[in-house]
Amino acid sequence: MAGEPAASVDFVPGVGLKIPRHLGVIMDGNGRWAQKRGKRRTEGHVEGVKALRGIVEHCINYGVDYLTVFSFSSENWSRPQDEVSFIFNLLRRFVASDLQRLIRNNVKVRIIGARQGLDPSLVRLIEDVEAKTSANTGLTLVVAFNYGSKAEIVAAARHLAREVAAGRLDPEAIDEQRIGDALYTAGLPDPDIIIRTSGEQRLSNFLLWQAAYAEFIFVDEHWPDFNEASFVRVLETYSRRDRRFGGIGTAAS
Ligand code: IPE
Ligand code: IPE
Ligand code: MG
């Protein structure tokens, strides 16, 4: 009717979406997904890998430049030994089954986290994957494996302190850029979105420094259930957010 405000138009999937440059994902809920179905937790991790393949594909198709996924935290060592070994083997299996496809899809892989404490053969595998995809120019897939953000910051502080002690760095020259450059994520833009699945609303030591201005999007689905529709819903939510970075934002200007 004339004079009445137009009805708000819902977002059409894939159309008019704001695409983040960098998406971070805490892939949580594999164990509960399995337990709910009377399966072993490890089966949830296997299904989780399928959801990972899916989100890599969606990021490529929708034009996301960087995808960082949290796949094993430095705190996850406290799980039963069997489950830890299973997750480590899953990383090896993922590389064996998916490396060629990643190369074909022009994906550059980077693995962040502590390498001390990892089996030397696993470290070699990680280096090999990085080397074989280093010339790729499409999506950068960052896998946070044996990663903990506080440990990352400690390592960066030690590195900078050593530089100062050796007389190579003036303490006054330490700024946000220098600290960023000393983190595992050096050279990557900060994440625009951090998604966590499974209904938990915490960071669990993921990208604490880098997520300073990320939009947090918590979804109830367990990670193995996260599909393209879930991905589009996240983009819709993100598109409606007003990122102000301390300013007054678009709604007020
Ligand atoms: C996430 O799923 C995967 C890893 C932490 C390796 P979980 O294994 O944490 O699943 P829940 O949270 O116990 O359901
Ligand atoms: C965070 O999930 C780590 C990964 C998804 C790899 P957790 O399941 O380990 O986190 P908490 O223990 O619930 O905080
Ligand atoms: Mg969990």
Image (spheres, rainbow, N blue to C red):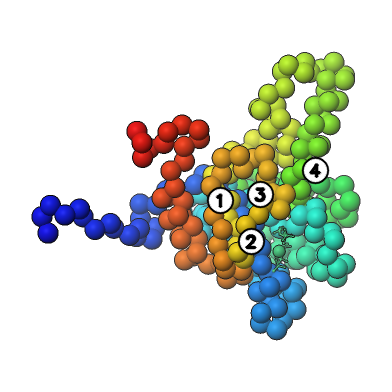
Q: Mark 3 or mark 4, which has the lower sequence index?
A: 3
Q: Nearer the viewer, residue 2 or 90?
A: 2
- Residue 35 in view, yes or no: yes
Residue behind mark 2: 200
Q: Is residue 201 above or below residue 19?
A: below
Alpha carbon separation for disc pair 3 and 4: 18 Å
The mark nearer the N terminus, 4 or 1, is: 4
Residue positioned 68% across, 55% down in the render: 70
Horizontally, is 56 left or right of 114 in the view? left
In depth, the one of 53 and 235 nearer the eye is: 235
Separation of marks 4 and 2 at Cα, in angstroms: 22 Å
Mark toward the viewer: 2 or 3 = 2
- 245 is higher (above) or lower (below) than 170: below
| Mark 2 C-beta to ligand 2 under 8 Å | yes
Q: Does 21 sit left or right of 208 as displayed?
A: left
Tell me if 140 is positioned left or right of 72 in this view. left
Q: Is residue 104 shown to the viewer in this render?
A: no
Question: Which amino acid type corresponds to the residue marked 3 in the rendered image?
Answer: Val
Label 1: few (<14), some (14–19) or many (≥20) C-alpha neighbours in 10 Å: many
The amino acid pointed to by label 4 is: Ala
Q: Nearer the viewer, residue 36 or 246?
A: 246
Ligand 2 image position (quadrant):
bottom right
Rendered image: mark on residue 144: none
